[in-house]
Image (cartoon, rainbow, N blue to C red):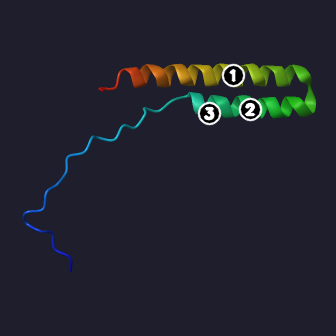
């Protein structure tokens, strides 16, 4: 069995940062699905899917940037 040395130095490490839950990844997925369905069915549906996808990505990036700016440096 492996035993730890009694005088072994443990290096301190920073805590891991996990982002909070977000609604934007599923919204992006739905937007892409609507975009792909619209490509097959109707151009108007494709445009709606594209707008939803782009808006969701922009809002997701905005939230991530805001959260990153609040992290301690």
Report which quarter residue 20 is drawn in.
top left
Callout 3: SS: helix
Q: Which residue is mark 1?
A: 54
Q: Which residue is mark 2?
A: 32
Give the CA distance from mark 3 to mark 2. 10 Å
Q: Position of residue 13 (x, y in %)?
A: 25, 45
Report which quarter residue 5 is drawn in.
bottom left
Pointer 3 or 1: first along the chain: 3
Number of numbered labels in the structure image: 3
- Left or right of residue 28: residue 41: right
Give the CA distance from mark 3 to mark 1. 13 Å
Q: Which residue is mark 3?
A: 26
Q: Residue at x 20, y 46 (%)?
A: 12
Callout 2: SS: helix
Give the CA distance from mark 2 to mark 1. 9 Å
Q: How many neighbours does mark 1 have within 10 angstroms: few (below 14), some (14-19), or many (20 or more)?
A: some
Is the Cβ of the residue at disc 3 closer than 8 Å to that at disc 2? no
Comparing 6 with 22, the one in front is: 6
Is the Cβ of the residue at disc 3 closer than 8 Å to that at disc 1? no
- Left or right of residue 35: residue 9: left
Pointer 3 or 2: first along the chain: 3
Q: How many neighbours does mark 3 have within 10 angstroms: few (below 14), some (14-19), or many (20 or more)?
A: few
Q: Residue at x 51, y 30 (%)?
A: 22
């Amino acid at each position: 069995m492996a035993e730890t040395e009694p005088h072994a130095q443990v290096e301190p490490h920073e805590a891991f940062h996990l982002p909070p839950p977000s609604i934007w990844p599923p919204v992006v997925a739905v937007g892409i699905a609507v975009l792909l369905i619209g490509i097959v069915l109707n151009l108007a549906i494709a445009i709606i899917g594209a707008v939803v996808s782009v808006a969701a990505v922009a809002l997701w990036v905005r939230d991530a940037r805001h959260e990153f700016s609040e992290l301690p440096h």
